[in-house]
């Protein structure tokens, strides 16, 4: 079985990146894969909200600044979530506002160092960590800043999530044409939180990239802060069906490697 790193990215914030990382990671772990989700959205860390009851000894931001090793950053969420087949680990980013401000002032040289540390993290998790991680999800910062590019650079697969409104579509198209064409990995588009009257056929003709799914905007999801859908929504809820469909497509991608 192959090992894969998947960057989840978007042009705008609030498209559902963290929701997707947490849910796809959870579902793949339930299918027997060892998963690590790393919060690389340093400006708006939120992965920790999905896994409320656990606090790490250190944050991924400490690792990137050479203050600690990855072992003190990783938390095993497997038992918490009653996952029986695979394992699920998280690496949270420091949500403390003063730490966020510090990170934002990093210059280009410091960003290059972050990239080097991310490459090392990728190799460590896939090859040295016990258990070896099959799938790493990178919950990336939105937009075009260095930290987004860093995470796209180390990914084998990039998933660009968009809502499909005009502004988001324009920005996402720019990313797909200018940035994504320069990266090596496979690129998917995932439409999430689309409105009822969304024209799916038009979207499919607009993007040459594979569209993983088109997921409607559900009030019952919007009203949850941090939702692992298969734990809270009815099994046959359309959102769960969409997530399972995306997971099956990703599984094919994993098995190719
Ligand atoms: N399909 C959906 N329908 C409605 N709300 C959604 C959907 N997907 C995600 N959300 C909600 O959108 C908000 C932003 O999601 P989040 O994953 O935090 O976005 P991001 O990480 O891209 O900023 C959250 O309240 C989340 O529950
Ligand atoms: Mg987020």
Image (spheres, rainbow, N blue to C red):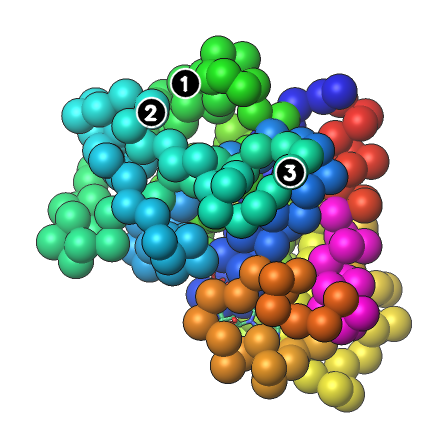
Graded by Cα atoms within 10 Å as few (under 14), some (14 to 19) or many (20 or more), the crowding at tag 3 reads few
Identify the residue at horizontal 81%, vertical 54% (top origin). Answer: 245
Identify the residue at horizontal 48%, vertical 47% (top origin). Answer: 80
* Mark sitting earlier along the chain (1/3): 3
* Mark sitting earlier along the chain (2/3): 2
The percent position of residue 36, horizontal first and vertical second, equals: 51, 35
Magenta stretch containing residue 241, yes or no?
A: yes
Q: Hey, which quadrant is residue 232 in on the image?
A: bottom right
Q: What element carries label 2?
A: helix
Q: Looking at the rendered structure, which numbered label has been put on residue 84? A: 3
Image vertical order of residue 239 relative to residue 196, above or below: above
The percent position of residue 58, horizontal first and vertical second, equals: 23, 35
Q: Give the range drawn in magenta.
A: 236-247
**Residue 130 or residue 63, whichever sits in front:** 130
Q: Looking at the rendered structure, which numbered label has been put on residue 120? A: 1
Q: Does the residue labelled 3 lie within 8 Å of ligand 1?
A: no
The percent position of residue 59, horizontal first and vertical second, equals: 27, 38
Find the distance from the CA under tag 1 to the CA under tag 3.
29 Å
Is 47 positioned to the left or the right of 256 in the image?
Answer: left
Q: Hey, which quadrant is residue 146 in on the image?
A: top left
Q: Is mark 1 within 8 Å of ligand 2?
A: no
Residue picked out by circle 2: 70
Q: What element carries label 1?
A: helix
Kindly check if marks 2 and 1 are in contact, taking CB atoms under 8 A apart as contact. no
Position of the N terminus, as image quadrant, is: top right
Image vertical order of residue 200 relative to residue 116, above or below: below
Is 238 positioned to the left or the right of 193 in the image?
Answer: right
Identify the residue at horizontal 64%, vertical 80% (top origin). Answer: 218
């Amino acid at each position: 079985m192959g090992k894969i790193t998947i960057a989840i990215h978007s042009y705008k914030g609030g498209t559902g990146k963290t929701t997707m990382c947490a849910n796809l990671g959870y579902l793949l772990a339930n299918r027997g894969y060892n998963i690590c989700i790393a919060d690389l959205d340093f400006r708006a860390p939120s992965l920790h909200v999905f896994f409320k009851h656990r606090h790490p000894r250190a944050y991924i931001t400490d690792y990137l600044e050479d203050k600690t090793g990855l072992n003190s950053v990783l938390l095993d969420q497997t038992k918490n979530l009653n996952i029986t087949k695979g394992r699920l680990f998280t690496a949270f980013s420091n949500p403390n506002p003063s730490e966020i401000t510090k990170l934002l002032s990093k210059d280009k040289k410091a960003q290059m160092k972050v990239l080097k540390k991310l490459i090392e993290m990728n190799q460590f998790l896939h090859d040295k960590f016990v258990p070896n991680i099959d799938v790493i999800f990178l919950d990336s910062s939105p937009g075009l800043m260095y930290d987004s590019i860093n995470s796209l650079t180390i990914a084998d697969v990039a998933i660009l999530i968009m809502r499909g409104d005009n502004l988001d579509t324009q920005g996402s198209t720019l990313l797909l044409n200018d940035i994504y064409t320069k990266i090596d990995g496979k690129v998917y588009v995932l439409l999430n939180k689309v409105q009822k009257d969304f024209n799916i056929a038009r979207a499919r003709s607009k993007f040459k990239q594979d569209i993983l799914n088109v997921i409607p905007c559900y009030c019952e999801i919007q009203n949850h802060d941090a939702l692992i859908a298969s734990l809270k929504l009815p099994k046959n809820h359309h959102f769960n069906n969409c997530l399972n469909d995306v997971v099956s497509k990703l599984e094919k991608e994993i098995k190719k490697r």
